[in-house]
Image (cartoon, helix red, strand yellow):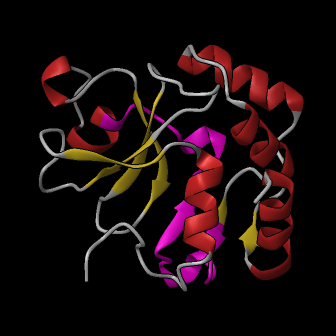
Amino acid sequence: MSIERLLAEISRSHFPNAPATPAQLAAFEVRVGWVLDADLRAFYLHCDGATLFQPRQEDPNYRILSLAEIQRARIAMRRRDEDAFGPASWYTLLYLQDSDYIVLDAARQANGRYPLLDAYHETYPLEVRPIASSFSEFLEKALASGDDYFWLED
């Protein structure tokens, strides 16, 4: 499904924030030192973060972080900006409750898209596993999940 259709679904049935401005995107890219891929750029120009399925105040399973909330995963999860706590290229993208995140690997791209990884707080950074090859792939599976974590086994 195209990113445009996914964004329309978010606007229709979920809880998007107001859009980010081009200036906010540029400032974010300067701050983190990497450039948003086309999917993420489209998302953040559409909405600067969102919650899926339920409003943010109800502790949703899927909360896509705003640009201001994205940070190195090792800082968010271990409060240390040291290599022992995960690569510097892993950044938080979604908050999943209970200190769990979906992280983006800014050091790798396939077909111009960043892969997404499951970062479970109990095993991070030793056991981080790929769950989607792009943000749009992740979003499509998440929106079809019925508010379940689609990558976890039953």
Q: Quadrant of the N terminus?
A: bottom right
Quarter-wise, where is residue 153 in the image?
A: bottom left
Query: Quick check: 55 above or below 94?
Result: below
**As drawn, 111 above or below 18:** above
Q: Residue at x 61, y 84 (%)?
A: 54
What residue lies at 85% left-to-right and 25% top-to-bottom?
A: 23
Tally of marks: 0
On screen, residue 41 above or below 100:
above
In x, y percent, where is residue 16? 76, 66
Q: In this view, does 30 lie to the left or right of 118?
A: right
Quarter of the image with the C terminus in it: bottom left
61 or 23, which lies in front? 61
Image-based side of 113 in relation to 149, left or right: right
Instruction: Estimate the x, y position of residue 28 in percent, counting from the top left.
Output: 66, 26
Foreground of the two, 73 or 9 = 9
**Residue 68 drawn in magenta:** yes
Q: What stretch is highlighted in magenta?
A: 51-73
Residue drawn at (62%, 82%) of the image: 53
Residue appearing at x 55%, y 20% in the figure? 32
Vertical arrangement, residue 17 with respect to residue 67, above or below: below
Give the quarter of the image for residue 124. Answer: top left
User: Measured from the top left, where is residue 10 in percent x and y?
Assistant: 77, 69
Q: Is residue 65 magenta?
A: yes
Left or right placement of residue 114 versus residue 48 in this view = left
State which quadrant residue 138 falls in.
bottom right
